[in-house]
Amino acid sequence: MNSTWHEMINMTRHGFNRRRFLHTVSAASVAAGTLGFRDLISLQAEELRKRHKAVIVLWMAGAPSQMETFDPKPHHENGGGTKAIGTSVPGIQVAEGWEKTAQVMQHCNIIRSMSHKEGNHRRATYQLHTGYLPAGSVKHPSLGANITSQIADKDLEIPSIVTVGRGVDGGGAGFLGVNYEPFVVSQPGSIPENSAPLVSNSRYAKRLNLLGKLQQEFSDRGGRTVVQNQNAIYGKASRMVQSPSLQAFNTDDEPESLKSRYGNSQFGKGCLLARRLIEHGVTYVEVVSNGWDTHDNVFDRVATLASQVDPAMAALISDLEDRGMLDDTLVIWMGEFGRTPKVNGRGGRDHYPRAFNAMIAGGGTKGGQVIGSTTPDGTRVQDRPIAVNDLFRSICHSLEIDPELEHMSPLGRPMKIVDGGEVIQELFS
Amino acid sequence: MCHYIRQWKRFGLLGFLVIVASSPAMAGSNMNYRNHVAVAQQVDQLIEQNIKEKGQPIAKAASEEDFLRRLSLDLVGRIPSVGEMTLYSLDPDPLKRDKLIQKLIDSEDFAYNWATYWNDVLYSRATDSRAGRLQSRDFINWMKENIETNKPWDEVATELITAIGDVNGNGATALIFAHQGEPKEITAEVTRIFLGIQIQCANCHDHPTDTWTREQFHQMAAFFPRVAVRRNRMKGFNVFEVVSIDKERKSNAQDILNNPQRLVRTLDKNGDKKISRDEVQGKGRLTRLFGRFLELGDKNGDQALTAEEIQGIPLPGGTRRASTEYYMPDLQNPTARGTLMQPAFFLREEKVPSGLKDAERRALLAKYVTDPDNPWFAKAFVNRIWSEMLGRGFYSPVDDMGPLRDAEHEQAIELLSKAFTQNGYDTKWLFRTIANTAAYQRSIVAPSKQTDGDEPVAFACATPTRLRSEQIFASLLELSGLEMNRDGASEVRGPARRFQNDPKSKFTNLFNYDPSTPQKDLMGTIPQSLFMMNSAIIDKMVSASGNGPLARIVRKYNDDTDVIEEIYLLVLSREPSKREMEICQDYLKKSNSRNEAFEDIMWSLVNSSEFISKR
């Protein structure tokens, strides 16, 4: 059985490969006496690559206050005086400051009953990215890396998984390896650092050709594997450098009117870039907004942040909709936990993982609904508690990925993409 | 005896005498483990015998130029300078390999290079990613001094396990700091790094592939409940310290909520079996916390708490910190306190006395871990260093050994580990010994034609390995001829350092990897190759104008062949082969500009996988 496992890992690690696949099927068939369940999943994944499903995560680093975003409590002292406003969906209210998002509420599913136990930023961020708690000795792949390894287009000339902003804990490929490590863009809007050759295109091509010839010697002298790996990465990098798709990173040619809808903030530019990247075939983009750790002055600080995130998120959702991409693109707004319902002495709110909110749009979800609720004072989940693995399972469901699929960690311990949890059915029915 | 006769035929008379003199069988318990050459030969003998039993051929020794480059990268962390290459090749001494090994091990760069290795080992798995940024320099300085003074490995391990105090200027706190004093994480890392055993799978259930039980993991964690990492706000925003907490420190809430029935009995004035805000007036802490308790516990919203409701109030986060003993979590009921664990080391039978202070607990664990009777301590270190130098370990991954794993050439690692222990965990001795083995000094060219994808028998030939970030950085510095501190960031302080905007930190962030990763999983990244292909730094380095290394060569030599040879020596520390010379000459002929052609050649070599690999 071990050799089968090994093949499975090769397959999931390095993408679908027909020759390898046939080999695996025969090995698996010998072991199980039939075509295995996972072989079918692999076939299905191949189909999905063609459909180009994608995910955009809008990550509110530092943990956003639920009372000042999508679970306002205007009638309770814990609401802190934050007003609620109506939305495009009768009966659904959100906090003031989110007027533009309110107008696309028909596409949005607010989850007000998220809950977990980690009150530490790093550990919770790791959990909300990998589905697992950090364990120093195992580096879990992020859900994004898992998704990319399953459905990304292998022929894409630019990286399939991109983070806009500073990378976050648990956002890496972990033991899935460099192929699924997110490509980090720190300056959204222009093409990435070092991706413009400093010599003419023809000379660049000549150099690559010479490099290939000169590598032969080392390859023959015992360095074959090393040279092969290097060729693979250089092939990818130089394809990217020379690819027209590289222009996906450059937002100069977007109409000014659209740019101004997204807003001039780094986050707004990041969201516009996210849409462009998905359009060019990227599978997973995470756009990071920093500064949500509002232990003091929560109302003013969230107002400032919302003035950047609200227009960007609303523009992203309607732009995806306008282009007919929203059904296949899952947009997730979230942070690592929520904030204390009771306002502290400095007009701030502290860490609160017991009850917080998240929002999901597109990707085949129903939209226009609120899932779960908190008590009037906001201290507890009142109904429909949603755990991290429920959310992750639902993301997999939207992308038609099998959450039970196991990767072998380097220590030979199988790990599911999502451990436990149930799909949030309301999202899809 | 016929065994020795066979060896006599192989080594000749001299070899026979060395083997007889150093053989444990011949010399009994008096074997001279100190003699690194003798031990190296014994190790080789065991390995070669094994390979031959498998019917496999053995590669020839690496050429002098390959050996010099390999040794420089392994010991001092950079490619050799052109001057060093010349001196070495002109040295007629037949023992010059051992002489060079000795010289490099005694250099300051050796200490710095391996200090950065341990820095990567410790911080790559840090659960607090901020720790490395804040403390790396302190750790490297501390480790460098340990290596320079050849502090025995058991002492280094003991200091890391028992560290206490301000993390600034105290590199020994690295292991505790990197994991925020969290007992389970520290337990996992202590066993992984110092014993090469992965016990952390037993955190949640008995280990699937080893014999460790869940209880054993948590017994080991019970050595650490009293250690904590705290921010010391008196000294500044980012000042942390490792402290011992030996006094039971119940939090206010925990203290009050300990006995709900009694609390209600004593405070309930009106006999309604619950306590209200009026009834807790003037009760100090309870009065202050009551609002919070209502928020958390008042299920029916009557603004009063019954004993049952109080029972249901979850204990605040950080409760663990308030306890001086360790509790194994109850998997069925995560909010419950769990089972009290008595500290115990999973490789020893004896019981640890109860109630030990933090310092006593950790000192005792350090003693258990480093005890010469615990074979895994020496083996883990030997396997790690061997694996880093040869590109392949006796056990792989380097940190997953343990009694149920199979080692390649098990007798060889047993012997080397025993000798390392006998030498009082003398790390420089181990480096000298490994570098002196024929196994280390073999060529990377596989002795027979290997079919695609087949891995040669372990240590039958050398394995090309990817350089660590520090090695690439130092090699780029070496070939550019810049006089710059290896710790390029040493002068950068303040915000640039904190946000890692200095060139050295940016380079490190780009090229760093966890050195415990098996070599075959290291494939490089796109941003790395973009840096090598297109960054202004590399562009300047390969420029034939200005004052870069290529410009100097082009000015100095008129003959094309000379220039090509010099470029090869400078970048790859070897002369070009006949075929390579032809390719380069041909490229020159087809180019309009001689200088541009040389730039392209130099660019290709800097971008070659050979440059970022050890061969």
Image (cartoon, coloured by chain):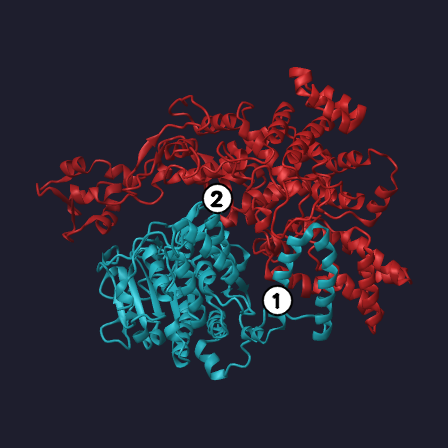
Name the image quarter holding residue B373.
Answer: top right
**Three-letter amino acid code at disc 1?**
Glu
Determine if residue B534 is in view: yes
Q: Which residue is mark 2?
A: A411
Q: Nearer the viewer, residue B523 or A58?
A: B523
Q: Colour of chain B?
A: red
The colour chain A appears in is cyan
Question: Relative to B94, is A38 on the left or the right?
Answer: left
Residue placed most toward the observer, A304 or A102: A102
Q: Give coordinates of residue A305: x percent, y percent.
A: 42, 67
In the rendered image, residue B240, in percent from the top left (x then y), is placed at: 50, 43
Nearer-N-terminus badge (1/2): 1
Query: Residue B234: x and y, percent?
Result: 48, 44
SS at badge 2: loop
Q: Is residue A137 above or below residue A287?
A: above
* Helix, strand or loop at mark 1: loop
State the residue at coordinates (60%, 69%): A240
Residue A170 seen by the camera? no
Left or right position of B177 against B329: right
Relative image position of residue A132 (x, y in whole percent): 40, 50
Categorize mark 1 by other alpha carbons within 10 Å: few (<14), some (14-19), many (20+): some
Residue name at image x 49 percent, y 39 percent: B189
Residue B207's image quarter?
top left
- Give the chain letter at badge 2: A
Q: What residue did someone put label 1 on?
A: A193
Chain designation of label 1: A
In the picture, the quarter occupied by the N terminus of chain B is: top right
* Residue type beneath disc 2: Leu
